[in-house]
């Protein structure tokens, strides 16, 4: 009887032929995940490094600087900073909330224009408004000159005129520029409030004033907190306006201690005190965002109830909305334009052209770098899909909350150490004297800009990627595309508008940036911002008016984009 042998059962030697593809796939996925985590941690470390360096400098071997600062510098600087932030926060809230309520809930002449025009003061930096205000209101300016001519006064002792170079003057000027932060967030909340809730209030007999205080304002409180926090952050970062007004804030103390008193350790210690203010503001902002979900009851599907203002009430509404636009943008712009026409030969110089070229180069380079890094961070966080990755990437966006002077102090030491290492290595190995190549080339400034404005590019990349269905990426991966090719071929073309908007915002903010630029720029290197600052410091602001006007004209672009984006989102 023939014997039929069965096929042998595959042994362990035959298994790799079947298991190898799955094993290699696992290895590839693990390697991609490791590369993603490594890139994520490296980029985040570069952003956080200046803050870590600042803490090390402040709490290192600084001698007896701290007791001296506590007894002489800090008490006055802390109190001045506190009152400045409190004043700016209060006044910006008053202007921003009132104008947002009027253009949202009331109908009066010019309302359609005021809806976008109230954002225009964001286009002009606070230090330029400060310089223009002093140029207009100082003793030799047009305002007091006209007053003396009109009433026959001979000198300043014959009449009283408010001192613009003071803490109240700084509060007023900065509030006229920063109120759009509150206007923008508050108006968005007013537009999203439930029409049913407001209609019920009106049915119960609530007038516009009672409706505002009893219903709308409590619902909008979280958004107001967010806007006020953003305005206070910008107030804390300012150095040009406060120095020109003679207001010695913590930011001014950092600048003065570092450059005028040659104490980097003292500047670092003052910067750590500023970080406490930043942490407080971040807590307020985060608390406001956490409660923001309670600010909107239901999404409205019908037009909000409106109050028609005519006669005296309509005129008052027009005046309330027009006054901050006139004082915060139109009047400074007219002062700049007049100064440019009267002094165009003193403005159109080689120094101006050089500063314009430097500003354009730095702004373009910073916009490209931050867009690349921010998009990479957002994409890595997207494909990792973990809370840890999200927390790490959000940490990389903290630089926007840190004042430019603080970043400059934190950047200088590690960059100087790297510069010295490169110089000694090149000298020892190749006999080439490179000097401080990173600082002298302006790379340190570029690094500071990337850290400071990373939040904008990261936010643009994250927002764009959130609008892409994960199914598209999954289909591309199924067809064999790697994560890099998926990003290049699928994601980037679809999020290009968001990336361009984020890059443009970074470009304009770098053009206006003053604190970090002053402290990190190489010798004999000017941007438009530092050129304006230098001329104003010499009491020759008219010679920097063309540079100031150029910054304002560039700053109008993102305001227009912001207004169009807000109108589209509200229309939807």
Image (cartoon, rainbow, N blue to C red):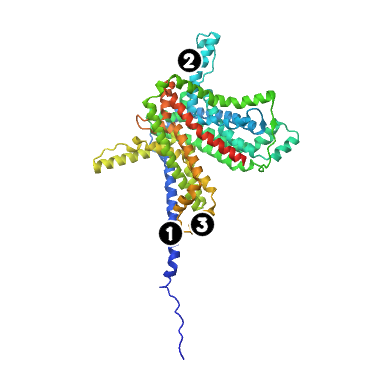
> Closer to us: mark 1 or mark 3?
3
Q: Secondary structure at mark 2?
A: loop
- Label annotation for residue 140: 2
Q: Which residue is mark 3?
A: 475
Q: Secondary structure at mark 1?
A: helix
Residue that protrudes farthest toward the right in the picture: 204
Q: Looking at the picture, how far across and down is residue 17, in whole percent?
A: 42, 70
Residue 304 versus residue 20: which sits nearer the camera? 304
Q: CA distance from mark 2 to mark 1?
A: 73 Å
Q: CA distance from mark 3 to mark 2?
A: 70 Å
- Label annotation for residue 28: 1
Q: Are marks 3 and 2 in contact (CB under 8 Å)?
A: no
Q: Looking at the picture, how far across and down is residue 48, in whole percent?
A: 44, 42
Decide: is 362 above or below 248: below
Tell me which corner region of the image, top left, top right, bottom left or bottom right, holds residue 368: top left
Q: Quadrant of the C terminus?
A: top right
Residue 480 versus residue 101: which sits nearer the camera? 480
Query: Is 276 situated left or right of 94 in this image?
Result: left
Q: Are marks 1 and 3 in contact (CB under 8 Å)?
A: no
Residue 115 versus residue 205: which sits nearer the camera? 115
Asked if residue 426 shows in the view, the reply is yes
Query: Is 172 situated left or right of 447 in this image?
Result: right
Q: Earlier in the sequence, mark 1 or mark 3?
A: 1
> Closer to us: mark 3 or mark 2?
3
- Label annotation for residue 17: none
Tell me which corner region of the image, top left, top right, bottom left or bottom right, holds residue 26: bottom left
Q: Secondary structure at mark 3?
A: helix
Count of numbered marks: 3
Residue at (46% x, 82% y) in the render: 6
């Amino acid at each position: 009887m023939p014997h039929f042998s069965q096929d042998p059962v595959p042994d362990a030697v035959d298994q790799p032929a079947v298991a190898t593809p799955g094993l290699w796939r696992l290895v590839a996925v693990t390697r991609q995940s490791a590369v993603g985590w490594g890139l994520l941690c490296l980029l985040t470390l570069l952003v956080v490094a200046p803050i870590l360096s600042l803490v090390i400098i402040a709490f290192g071997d600084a001698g007896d600087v701290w007791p001296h600062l506590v007894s002489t510098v800090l008490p006055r600087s802390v109190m001045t900073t506190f009152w400045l932030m409190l004043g700016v926060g209060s006044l910006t809230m008053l202007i921003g909330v009132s104008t947002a309520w009027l253009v949202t809930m009331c109908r009066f002449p010019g309302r359609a224009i005021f809806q976008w025009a109230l954002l225009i003061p964001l286009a002009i930096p606070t230090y330029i408004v400060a310089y223009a205000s002093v140029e207009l209101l100082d003793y030799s300016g047009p305002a007091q000159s006209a007053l003396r001519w009109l009433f026959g006064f001979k000198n300043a002792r014959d009449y009283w005129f408010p001192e613009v170079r003071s803490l109240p003057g700084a509060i007023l000027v900065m509030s006229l520029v920063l109120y759009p932060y509150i206007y923008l967030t508050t108006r968005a909340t007013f537009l999203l409030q439930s029409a049913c809730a407001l209609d019920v209030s009106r049915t119960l007999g609530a007038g516009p004033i009672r409706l505002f205080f009893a219903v709308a304002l409590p619902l909008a409180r979280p958004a107001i907190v967010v806007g006020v926090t953003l305005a206070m952050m910008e107030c804390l970062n300012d150095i040009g306006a406060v120095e020109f007004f003679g207001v010695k804030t913590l930011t001014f103390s950092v600048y003065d201690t570092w450059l005028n008193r040659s104490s980097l350790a003292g500047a670092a210690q003052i910067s750590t005190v500023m970080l406490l203010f930043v942490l407080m503001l971040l807590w307020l902002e985060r608390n406001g965002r956490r409660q923001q979900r309670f600010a909107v009851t239901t999404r409205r599907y019908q037009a909000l109830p409106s109050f028609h203002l005519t006669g005296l009430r309509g005129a008052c509404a027009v005046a309330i909305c027009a006054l901050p636009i006139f004082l915060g943008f139109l009047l400074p712009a007219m002062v700049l334009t007049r100064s440019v026409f009267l002094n165009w030969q003193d403005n159109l110089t080689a120094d101006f052209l050089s500063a314009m070229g430097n500003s354009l180069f730095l702004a373009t380079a910073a916009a490209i770098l931050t867009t690349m890094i921010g998009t990479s961070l957002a994409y890595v966080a997207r494909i990792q899909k973990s809370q840890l990755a999200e927390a790490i990437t959000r940490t990389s966006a903290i630089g926007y909350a840190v004042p430019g002077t603080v970043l400059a102090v934190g950047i200088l030491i590690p960059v100087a150490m790297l510069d010295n290492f490169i110089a000694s290595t090149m000298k020892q190995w190749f006999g080439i004297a490179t000097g401080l190549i990173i600082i002298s080339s302006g790379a340190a400034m570029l690094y500071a800009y990337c850290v400071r404005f990373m939040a904008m590019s990261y936010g643009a990349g994250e927002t764009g990627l959130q609008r892409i269905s994960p199914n598209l990426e999954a289909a591309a991966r199924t067809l064999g595309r790697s994560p890099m090719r998926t990003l290049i071929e699928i994601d980037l073309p679809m999020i290009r508008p968001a990336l361009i908007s984020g890059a443009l915002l970074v470009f304009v903010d770098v053009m206006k940036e003053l604190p970090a630029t002053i402290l990190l720029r190489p010798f004999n290197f000017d941007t438009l911002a530092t050129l304006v600052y230098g001329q104003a410091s010499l009491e020759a602001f008219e010679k920097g008016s063309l540079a100031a006007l150029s910054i304002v004209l560039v700053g109008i672009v993102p305001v227009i984009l912001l207004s169009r984006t807000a109108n589209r989102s509200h229309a939807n």
